[in-house]
């Protein structure tokens, strides 16, 4: 975004210099023309840059599965996501539950962290913390999570958001830190819904196979 703004400002300054320096009989039409030119140039640069930004934006896909065996039981989850940039090699990404299951404006319309008890971050029920990304993918099983699929503070219908950055867990020393952990851009999001039984078992099988493969490759490397 910074690059976009800088380009526009430079162009505007260049165009007005060209006009004031010129001794024209019809300054108004010249002015209109140079404004049109400037506008066309800015639009062109803007489109090119936004296209490039879109292309640079990683396409993160995957699944986050929750299971809760009883209404008061702790939540378990599988996180299986891919499509992260492979560099830097060992990065951490924050994942949270956000307030609204509204993707009408992409991940932005999911609002702030879901915070039914009005407490600071990282004590929100859906503050899942940081996840290590290896070779562009992230997969993790977590148990004992505070969020719930039942009761007045159920996260069903709310959103899971994957961030571009790491969660500072409220230690960043600014207001954003105790609201959202300064976790950066929203890379991917989804709405928590209800799925058919069997998906959890399949994910559990895939998870243990992935674990086995990783152990084998680590043994070979050693
Ligand atoms: Cu978040
Ligand atoms: Zn939070």
Image: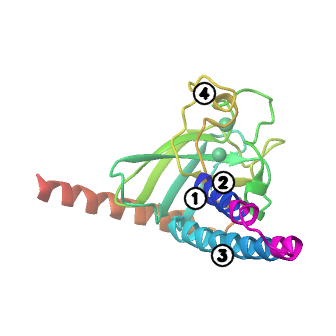
Say which of 165 and 219 sits in front. 165
Mark 2 packing: few (<14 Cα in 10 Å), some, or many (20+)? many
Q: Nearer the viewer, mark 3 or mark 1?
A: 3
Whole-Å distance between the Cαs marked 3 and 4?
41 Å
Q: Mark 1 highlights which residue?
A: 64
What residue is shown at x 56% (from left), y 31% (from top)?
A: 169
Q: Nearer the viewer, mark 4 or mark 2?
A: 4
Whole-Å distance between the Cαs marked 1 and 2?
8 Å
Residue 176's spot in the image, x, y percent?
Answer: 67, 32
Main secondary structure of the magenta stretch: helix
Report the disc number at residue 21: none
Whole-Å distance between the Cαs marked 3 and 1?
39 Å
Whole-Å distance between the Cαs marked 4 and 1?
24 Å
Q: Give the range drawn in magenta.
A: 16-32
Q: Are marks 1 and 2 in contact (CB under 8 Å)?
A: yes
Of callouts 3 and 1, the N-terminal one: 3
Q: Which of marks 2 and 3 is in front?
A: 3
**Can residue 83 be seen here?**
yes
Report the disc number at residue 170: 4
Q: Mark 3 highlights which residue?
A: 44
Q: Are marks 3 and 1 in contact (CB under 8 Å)?
A: no
Q: Is residue 71 magenta?
A: no
Q: In this view, does 181 lie above or below 65?
A: above
Instruction: Say which quarter of the image contains residue 196.
Output: bottom right
**Can residue 198 be seen here?**
no
Q: Are marks 4 and 1 in contact (CB under 8 Å)?
A: no
Whole-Å distance between the Cαs marked 4 and 2?
19 Å
Whole-Å distance between the Cαs marked 2 and 3?
35 Å
Residue 205's spot in the image, x, y percent?
Answer: 42, 65
Q: Mark 2 highlights which residue?
A: 160
Q: Nearer the viewer, mark 4 or mark 1?
A: 4
Say what secondary structure mark 1 lies in.
strand
């Amino acid at each position: 975004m910074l690059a976009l703004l800088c380009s526009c400002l430079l162009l505007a300054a260049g165009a007005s210099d060209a006009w004031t320096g010129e001794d024209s009989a019809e300054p108004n039409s010249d002015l209109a023309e140079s404004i049109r030119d400037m506008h066309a140039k800015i639009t062109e640069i803007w489109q090119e840059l936004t296209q490039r930004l879109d292309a640079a934006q990683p396409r993160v896909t995957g699944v986050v599965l929750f299971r809760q065996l009883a209404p008061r039981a702790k939540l378990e989850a599988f996180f299986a996501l891919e499509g992260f940039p492979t560099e830097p090699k060992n990065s951490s990404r924050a994942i949270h539950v956000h307030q609204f299951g509204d993707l009408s404006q992409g991940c932005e319309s999911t609002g702030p962290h879901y915070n039914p008890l009005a407490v600071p971050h990282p004590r929100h029920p859906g503050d899942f913390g940081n996840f290590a990304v290896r070779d562009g993918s992230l997969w993790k099983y977590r148990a004992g999570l505070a969020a719930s699929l039942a009761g007045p503070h159920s996260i069903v219908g709310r959103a899971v958001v994957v961030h571009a950055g790491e969660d500072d867990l409220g230690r960043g020393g600014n207001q954003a830190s105790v609201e959202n952990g300064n976790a950066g851009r929203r890379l991917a999001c989804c709405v928590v819904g209800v799925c058919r039984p069997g998906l959890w078992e399949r994910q559990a099988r895939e998870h243990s196979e992935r674990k086995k493969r990783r152990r084998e490759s680590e043994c070979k490397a050693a």
